[in-house]
Image (cartoon, rainbow, N blue to C red):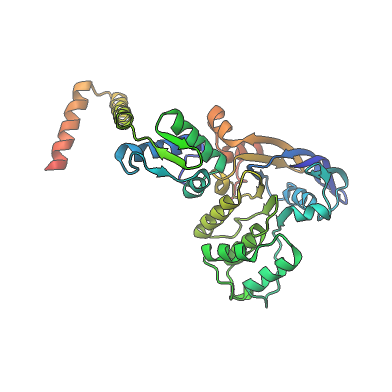
Amino acid sequence: MDYDPMSPIWLQVVNRIKGSIATGAIGPGEKLPGGRDMAVQFSINPNTAARVYQELERAGLCETRRGMGTYVTGDAARIAQLRTQMAADAAGRYLRDLRILGLSRADAIRLLSEKEENENA
Amino acid sequence: MLESRELTKKFGAKTAVDRVSLKLEAGHIYAMLGPNGSGKTTWMKMAAGLIKPTAGDVLFAGSPVGIASRRDVAYMSTEPYFYLWMTVEDAGKYYADFFEDFSMERFLSMLRSMDLNEKDKIKNLSSGMVAKMKIALTLARDAKVYMLDEPFNGIDLLARDEIRTAILHAAVPEKLLLLSSHLVEEMEAIADRAIFIRMGKLIEVRDLEEMRETDGVSMADRYRAIFGHGEVQA
């Protein structure tokens, strides 16, 4: 199974789809699979799939057009905001990990630029 | 949609199912869990109207199960009951004779999606292929309740994925699915409710996403907590 069975599966699927929207793997205005197709595609219960759409709509990331299906928002500003939010979350995780190791903010920044230079070298 | 009230079955001195009261609703996939011999199969067979309760009753849509409800309740047993000389297609025809809601078209389309050939003789199939065929036979019926007893047993990883997909295709809001298995992990993401049964007694029915959200535990964790360590078989 590709899910952590100890935390809600709807949340894990929402995060994966958010990631796809943020990276553009699913483009703005793109049609998403119907609830049942999504259940099959992600191998999840159909009620879980319904919850996924509810949450994505609540977050303003997709909209359901009556009788036509569910589409990713065409609102570029909302998608940019999602990207910013996900980047901030990633930065937060990075800082938290370094703090656990006893490193300072300055260390964090230095490590980050060193890492980037090494990768580009 | 399917309800058991104080349902009891005794085999001689042994009580296989002990006053189980349970209400199952359409639009859900239930996982029925418990170690071997906890009464899952016996409960299902009574719900399918195949064996008579010692006491209590089972209602389908408010009426006692029996000959009439067998049309609406499709049950896949663990026992193999196919003649070895039959081809997969013959098994379909056999089912079509028995059940008027059986769709040969749906059966053949499911066989194709699960990589089975209808011209193959059953005696030449691997155990995984027989398992897939049995699932296809059961789900090709247009029943309201599907009860699958141990659909993942003795089946390799890839075939398990195909079976999960077939089950999810069948799970439309107006239908009720009940899966029994001790392969708990296989059902974590596809079931939304779990029924825990121990030694014939109902322990509890849980909503799985709610349980993950409030208690941070998986279905397998709950299984271990109820039945003790060492009983989850992978």
Question: Horizontal and vertical percent for residue B100?
Answer: 74, 62
Work out which residue is located at the far front of the displayed protein and give it. Answer: A67
Q: Is residue A62 visible?
A: yes
- Residue B174 located left or right of residue B69: left
Asked where in the image residue B141 lies, by quadrant, the reply is: bottom right
Does B100 sit above or below residue A29?
below
In the displayed structure, A103 sits above or below B54; it is above
Q: Give me the residue at 33% from left, 39% from top.
A: A28
Decide which of B34, B118 is in the foreground and name it.
Answer: B118
Q: Residue at x 79, y 52 (%)?
A: B69
On the question of residue B81 being in view, the answer is no
Q: Position of residue B130 (x, y in %)?
A: 61, 66
| A5 relative to A78 in the view: left or right | right
How far from the left and from the top, in percent, is residue B135?
Answer: 63, 59
Towards the viewer: A55 or B196: A55
- Quarter of the image for residue A121 reads top left
User: Looking at the picture, does residue A1 appear above or below residue B80?
Assistant: above
Determine whether, in the image, residue A119 is placed left or right of residue A59: left
Q: Is residue A39 left or right of residue A110?
A: right
- The residue depicted at 60 percent of the width and 62 percent of the height is B106
Task: From the top left corner, tell me how far across and down residue A51 is, in percent.
Answer: 52, 35
